[in-house]
Image (spheres, rainbow, N blue to C red):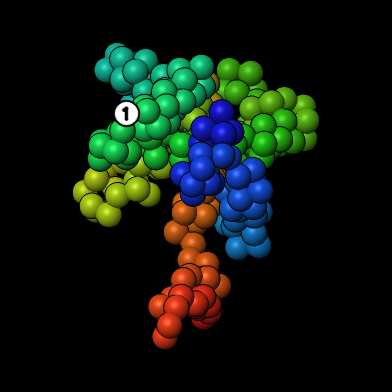
Amino acid sequence: MILLILPSSAWTEEGEYNWEDKVKNTICEDYKNFYSIGNLEKLAIGLGAAGVLANTSADREIQDRYQESVRNKDTDNLSTVTKMFGEGVITIPVYLGAALFGEFAGDVELSSTTGEWGKRCLRTLLVGYPPVFFLQRALGASRPDEGGSGWSPFSDANGVSGHSFNGAVPFITAAKMTDNPYYKYGLYFASTLGGISRINDNAHYFSQAALGWWMAYLAAASMNKTETKSPKVVVAPAAIRNGVGVMVMFRF
């Protein structure tokens, strides 16, 4: 799977895999972006906001109001569908299939875009899963039908909604691949549906669903930063008098 998700630049012209380029320029870069000071500050802000909701009566009030005033047969039916976006056993094979389709379907725009989307989703999961799994237990919060949302370290394993995280990844990843504002914001809205389904089904509190979405956003943004980051030093061939030389460009 790791070999599959790498960009084509990780392969040499002879078709041999360049493992060093892969490590330095792809996976490690994604992790460096996620654990950068700026990104950790954003994660801390999200944790702080979730902590206020989880450790006060706000979470329970939101949950009770939703169950009493919003939930109905239609929202249950919608939740049955949107919950599937958060099922890793369903979505991970889809991402793998999309990545394979992009590799073997040829140089067709649709296959190229689909393949790139699949690869980026898998990379986002690789970046986001470790902190999600850690915080699920470290925060120690319970589900609505099990108890309160207050944080009690390592007492339970529901501090972050895994379904919300998984359900947000494909849509946030796609949103970052388009410049069309209508598509972009529509995809961002769709990315919240997995988390809403967990609130609807009384399986997670609002703070837990929101934190799952936020971590998916940060993981996708970290992956996307790797794709859009311009190198500071570029070495390229250049034509000179009586031959070919090397040009070195420094970006500031």
Q: Is residue 110 left or right of residue 198?
A: left
Q: Is residue 148 left or right of residue 101?
A: right
| Position of the N terminus by quadrant | top right
| Picture residue at 51% right of the left edge, 42% below the top | 14
Q: Is residue 77 left or right of residue 245?
A: left
| Picture residue at 42% right of the left edge, 85% below the top | 241
Mark 1, residues whose alpha carbon is within 10 Å: few (<14), some, or many (≥20)?
Answer: few
| Picture residue at 23% right of the left edge, 52% below the top | 180
139 w.r.t. 39: above or below: above
Q: Position of residue 53 (x, y in %)?
A: 57, 43
Q: Position of residue 24 (x, y in %)?
A: 64, 52
Q: Amino acid at mark 1?
A: Ala
Q: Is residue 71 left or right of residue 88?
A: left
- Residue 64 in view: no
234 w.r.t. 218: above or below: below
Say which quarter of the image contains residue 232: bottom right
Q: Residue furthest front?
A: 242
Q: Secondary structure at mark 1?
A: loop
70 w.r.t. 180: above or below: above
Q: Position of residue 169 (x, y in %)?
A: 45, 36
Q: Position of residue 40 (x, y in %)?
A: 64, 56
**Would you name the residue on which mark 1 appears?**
105
| Picture residue at 24% right of the left edge, 45% below the top | 183
